[in-house]
Image: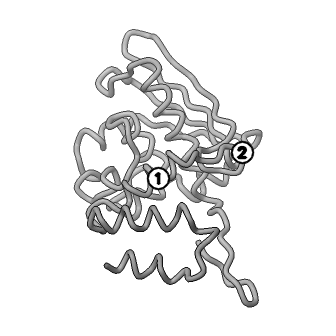
Amino acid sequence: FFFKQKTAYEIRPRDWSSDVCSSDLACLDLRAEHLIKAANISRIEVAVNPLAIKLCGNPTPRDGLEAKLSIAHSVAVALADGAAGVAQYLDAHVSDPAIIALRDKVVLNADAAIGKEQARVRIALHGGASHELFVEHARGSNGRPLSDAELESKFRGLADGVLLPPQVETALRICRALESITDTGELARAAAG
């Protein structure tokens, strides 16, 4: 979000985003490390700060907008798809019966000892095995900043279908040189085509 500060604009992190990002990050990491398949999951326990549940505790989002503020949805798509990008928050995906079934297995637990960027996820599998992970800092937070490659990948994912490939490349080139350009309007003009 951009906030006006007297004569300049400042970019500040969005406090609520880390509440969702830590839990889906834990699921993405657990899925990859243990090759977890959604069909094998019996229960997903997510422990987060109580404020996270207050802001993002909707277990049954009705559309993509509500899903963006749903820990349960973010966890479900991370485990089902191995991703939590734009496509996972489209209305059609939110109403997908397989995603709904997985969301129904999510149990949110408020834990005041867990910080706002933290999450503990425990995935129980049919047959009794379980896997747990604690995330100290959400990916993209000050405590775990994105690498240049991760930022570029995220930008490409968000720009896909919005900008043409040449516009994406031009915007990335300008962003890489942002500290040295004299006209920041160049970026807006590049995105506009």
Residue 81 position within the rendered picture, expressed as x and y whole percent measured from the top left: 32, 37
Task: Report helix, strand or loop for mark 2.
Answer: loop
The image quadrant that residue 170 belongs to is: bottom left
Give the residue type at disc 2. Gly
Q: Residue at x 46, y 52 (%)?
A: 152
Residue 169 position within the rendered picture, expressed as x and y whole percent measured from the top left: 37, 61
The image quadrant that residue 125 belongs to is: top left
Please tell me which of labels 1 and 2 falls first in the chain. Answer: 2
The reply, left or right, for residue 10 in relation to residue 65 is right
The reply, left or right, for residue 32 in relation to residue 9 is left
Name the disc covering residue 152, or none. Answer: 1
Give the residue type at disc 1. Glu
Viewer-nearest residue: 152 or 56: 152
Q: Is residue 33 above or below residue 143?
A: above
Q: Is residue 26 above or below residue 49?
A: above
Q: Residue at x 62, y 70 (%)?
A: 180
Q: Residues within 10 Å of mark 2 (few under 14, many from 20)?
A: few
Q: Is residue 70 above or below residue 2?
A: above
Q: Is residue 63 above or below residue 123?
A: below
Q: The C terminus is located in which quarter?
A: bottom left
Q: Residues within 10 Å of mark 1 (few under 14, many from 20)?
A: some
Viewer-nearest residue: 64 or 44: 64
Per the image, the residue denoted by label 2 is: 143
